[in-house]
Structure formats: structure tokens, C-alpha cells
Amino acid sequence: MAEVTLRIGDRDHRVGCADGQEAHLIWLGKMVAGRWDAAQRASGGGNGERTMLLVALMLADALNDAEARAPTGEHPLLGQLADRLEALATALEEDAPNA
């Protein structure tokens, strides 16, 4: 098991993770740290627990927005792309010399 140190606010946090997941965990920590100052201001300079709650709510809001924008079902361009690829494959088969 690997460990990384995340700097969030003015504190270091050691967090364990699966081997090979260190870079991903560091990236996630940067997402949290990037919202820390805004959350601390919104909390009125309150304690770290309240600030972390606000960071979690900010991230949940961003996730909710992303899920709401996510396409459902097949994207119309995928059908067009599939049709064009099929036509290209057919054309290549027709042009190929018979062996």
C-alpha cells in the first residue's frame, strides 16, 4: 500500500492508497485544495471541519452539474460516424484487388 501527503489548507494529510494510484490521489487532493480558500471564506473562517464540508458540497455540486450535462444514450454523431466508417470499409473492399 502506498501513501501520499496531501496539502489542503494549511495542513498536511497522509493518505493511503493502492500502489500505482498515487498520482490520481494527488490530483484529487489538488481538486479539494483548489476549493479550500473559497470554502473557508464562505464558512466565515470557521473550523476545518465546516470548511471541508463546504468543499465536499462544492464538489458534489460540480459532479451534479456534470452528470446533468452528460449525454444519455447514443450521441447522434456516433451514428453518423458509424455510417461513414461502414461506407469507407465497403469502398475499400470494392477497390481491393481479388486474390
Image (cartoon, grey):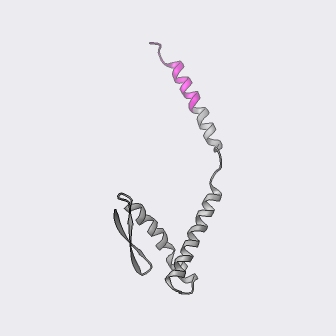
Q: Is residue 58 above or below residue 17?
A: below
What percent of the width, then of the height, locates residue 35?
Answer: 51, 74
Of residue 20 and residue 95, the one placed in the foreground of this image is: 20
Q: Quadrant of residue 58?
A: bottom right
Q: Is residue 93 above or below residue 24?
A: above
**Magenta region: which residues?**
85-99
Residue occupying the point 45% across, 79% down: 9
Tell me if residue 63 is in the magenta stretch: no
Tell me if residue 86 is in the magenta stretch: yes
Of residue 31 and residue 25, the one placed in the foreground of this image is: 25
State the count of labels. Answer: 0
Dominant SS type (magenta): helix
Q: Quadrant of residue 50?
A: bottom right
What percent of the width, then of the height, locates residue 72?
Answer: 65, 49
Residue occupying the point 35% across, 58% down: 19
What percent of the width, then of the height, locates residue 44?
Answer: 57, 87
Q: Is residue 56 above or below residue 91?
A: below
Q: Residue furthest front?
A: 1
Q: Is residue 98 above or below residue 32?
A: above
Query: Which quadrant is home to the N terminus?
Result: bottom left
Residue occupying the point 46% across, 65% down: 28
Query: Which quadrant is home to the C terminus?
Result: top left
What percent of the width, then of the height, locates residue 15?
Answer: 39, 70
